[in-house]
C-alpha cells in the first residue's frame, strides 16, 4: 500500500455548515487509508462552530488567512495568519472570526471520521433549523455540542444581519 497522498482540488467536497462557515474536505479518513481528516474552513464575520468537544479526536488548526479567537477550556486565544493551535480530545472549544475579512484555516483531525456529520446535514437540509437534531447527529460522529456558537454566547449574533 502506498503512503503517498495527493489531493486534487477538483475532488474535494464542500459543505456550508451555516451562512458564515464554509467547510471543504481535502482528506477524509472515511474514503482513504489515512488516519486523519484534513479540512479547509472559511469563517466569515462572526462565523464559527458551536462550543463542542471531540470525544476521540485531537484537532490542530493552522490559520492561513485572517485571525480567529478561540475559546478553549475556559481560556481565550487569538491566532493570526501563520499561527497554529492544538486542541486535545475531550477539550471544550469554539472559535469565531471577529474581523470583517474572512479567516481561513486548515484543520487536521486525528483520527479522522467526522465528514459523515456534514454529509448527513447536507442530506437533511431542514435539520439545520433544529438545534437538538444537530446535537444528536454530531453525537453519532463522536462530537458533543455543549453550547451555542460564540456569536450567540458573546451577544454578537444580531451584528451579522
Image (spheres, rainbow, N blue to C red):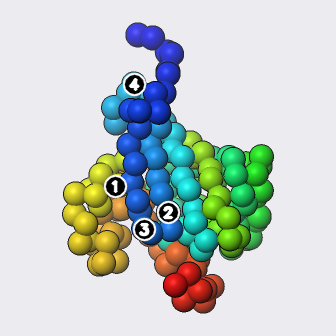
Q: CA distance from mark 1 to mark 3?
A: 13 Å
User: Where is the N terminus found, in terms of image quarters?
Assistant: top left
10 Å neighbourhood of mark 4: few (<14), some, or many (≥20)? few
Residue at numbered disc 2: 21
Q: Position of residue 140 (x, y in %)?
A: 30, 57
Q: CA distance from mark 4 to mark 2?
A: 27 Å
Residue shown at 60% from the left, 45% from the top: 106
Q: Position of residue 39 (x, y in %)?
A: 51, 44
Q: CA distance from mark 2 to mark 3?
A: 5 Å
The mark that comes first in sequence, 1 or 4, is 4
The mark that comes first in sequence, 4 or 2, is 2
* Count of marks overlaid on the render: 4
The mark that comes first in sequence, 3 or 4, is 3
Whether tag 2 and tag 3 are in contact, CB under 8 A, the answer is yes
The quadrant holding residue 121 is bottom left
Q: Give the SS element for disc 2.
A: strand
The quadrant holding residue 34 is top left
From the viewer's perspective, is the residue at label 1 or at label 3 nearer? 3
Residue 18: mark: 3
10 Å neighbourhood of mark 1: few (<14), some, or many (≥20)? some
Res 112 visible: no
Residue shown at 34% from the left, 36% from the top: 30
Residue shown at 51% from the left, 16% from the top: 4
Residue 149 located left or right of residue 96: left
Q: CA distance from mark 3 to mark 4?
A: 29 Å
Q: Position of residue 72 (x, y in %)?
A: 66, 66
Q: Give the SS element for disc 1.
A: helix
Residue at numbered disc 4: 33
Front in this rendered view, residue 148 or 14: 14
Front in this rendered view, residue 74 or 80: 80
Residue at numbered disc 1: 117
The quadrant holding residue 67 is bottom right
Amino acid at each position: 500500500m502506498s503512503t503517498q497522498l495527493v489531493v486534487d482540488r477538483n475532488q474535494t467536497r464542500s459543505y456550508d455548515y451555516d451562512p458564515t462557515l464554509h467547510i471543504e474536505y481535502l482528506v477524509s479518513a472515511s474514503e482513504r487509508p489515512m488516519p486523519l481528516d484534513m479540512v479547509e474552513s472559511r469563517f466569515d464575520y462572526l462565523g464559527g462552530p458551536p462550543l463542542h468537544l471531540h470525544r476521540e479526536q485531537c484537532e490542530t488548526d493552522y490559520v492561513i488567512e485572517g485571525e480567529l479567537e478561540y475559546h478553549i477550556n475556559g481560556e481565550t486565544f487569538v491566532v493570526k495568519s501563520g499561527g497554529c493551535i492544538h486542541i486535545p480530545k475531550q477539550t471544550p472549544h469554539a472559535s469565531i472570526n471577529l474581523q470583517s475579512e474572512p479567516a481561513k484555516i486548515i484543520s487536521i483531525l486525528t483520527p479522522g471520521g467526522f465528514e459523515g456529520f456534514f454529509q448527513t446535514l447536507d442530506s437533511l437540509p431542514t435539520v439545520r433549523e433544529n438545534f437538538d437534531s444537530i446535537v444528536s447527529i454530531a453525537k453519532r460522529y463522536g462530537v458533543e455540542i455543549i453550547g451555542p456558537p460564540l456569536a450567540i454566547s458573546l451577544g454578537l449574533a444580531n451584528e451579522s444581519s
